[in-house]
Image: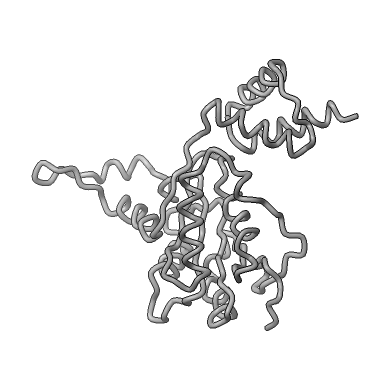
Amino acid sequence: MSLTAIAYRWHERQLQPIEFVQKLKLDELLGIERQKDAVVQNTRQFVAGKPANHVLLTGARGTGKSSIVKALLTEFAPQGLRLVEVAPHDLLQLPEVMAPLRGRPERYVLYVDDFSVANNDPALTALKTALDGGIEEPAENVLIYATSNRRHLMPQTRSDNAEYQWIDEELHPGESTEEKNSLAERFGLWLSFPAFTQDQYLDVVRLHLKRLNHALWDEETEKLALRWALNRASRSGRVAQQFARDWAGRHAS
């Protein structure tokens, strides 16, 4: 199989090249320096053929989890990094996804966005096998980078709490909770993304306005940006970008 693109989408049991790849730059992702440094270092090791870990990015929506993964491709594609987008419902097909990638000189990150699984979901077993390896040796040139708004990837239910037991003065979770937590623990690098502070949010608004050639900033613009976030009950990079587009569109000459 000819694999000449830098990004692919797994669809209908085949790798489909993505012609128009979104180009994001790492230095334009603000407010997440600690997380960015960690995932960049892990990816740098990976593209250099050194040991590296699967990555789980969890936390508040719109804070840059997906953007980091896309920006990694911009940064490391010249060094052989390739991105393969795999939908959560296609995780059962992971062996088929990995088969044509194994042994190639490129380094592939399987990108699973907005991932969570329901109780007893077969995808849970498939992902665990891919992360830890089954009988088959894991592909040395493939890693999984997953993003999720859920810290534990699986919903926590009232019945889970009922399974907790006190044993020798220590509180122990039940089997259901252990099963849910064990999936997240299989990712060697686990990074949390908290909601933006007000200052971080405003910094990102200014960045997006500058990218849209509207660098003018005054008290009125700041007030409108804060009101925009309040109306959406969220301060995030996504909300900042949406405000910048609205403001720049209204003031375009």
Task: Please state the horizontal and vertical placement of residue 161, each as a whole percent of the image.
Answer: 29, 41
In the figure, is residue 67 to the left or right of 164? right
Of residues 31 and 235, the one nearer the viewer is 31
Query: What residue lies at 60% left-to-right and 63% top-to-bottom?
Result: 76
Image point 40% across, 59% down: which residue?
A: 187
Q: Is residue 226 above or below residue 244?
A: above
The correct choice, above or below, for 114 with respect to 158 in the image is: below
What is the quadrant of residue 241 in the picture? top right
x and y, in percent, of residue 209 in the image: 73, 33
Quadrant in which the N terminus is drawn: bottom right
Q: Is residue 207 left or right of residue 132?
A: right
User: Looking at the image, which is closer to me, 131 or 21?
Assistant: 21
Q: Quadrant of residue 105?
A: bottom right
* Residue depicted at x 48% and y 55%: 39
**Can you name the residue that lies furthest to the right here?**
253
Q: Image quadrant for the C terminus? A: top right
Looking at the image, residue 30 lies above or below residue 108: above
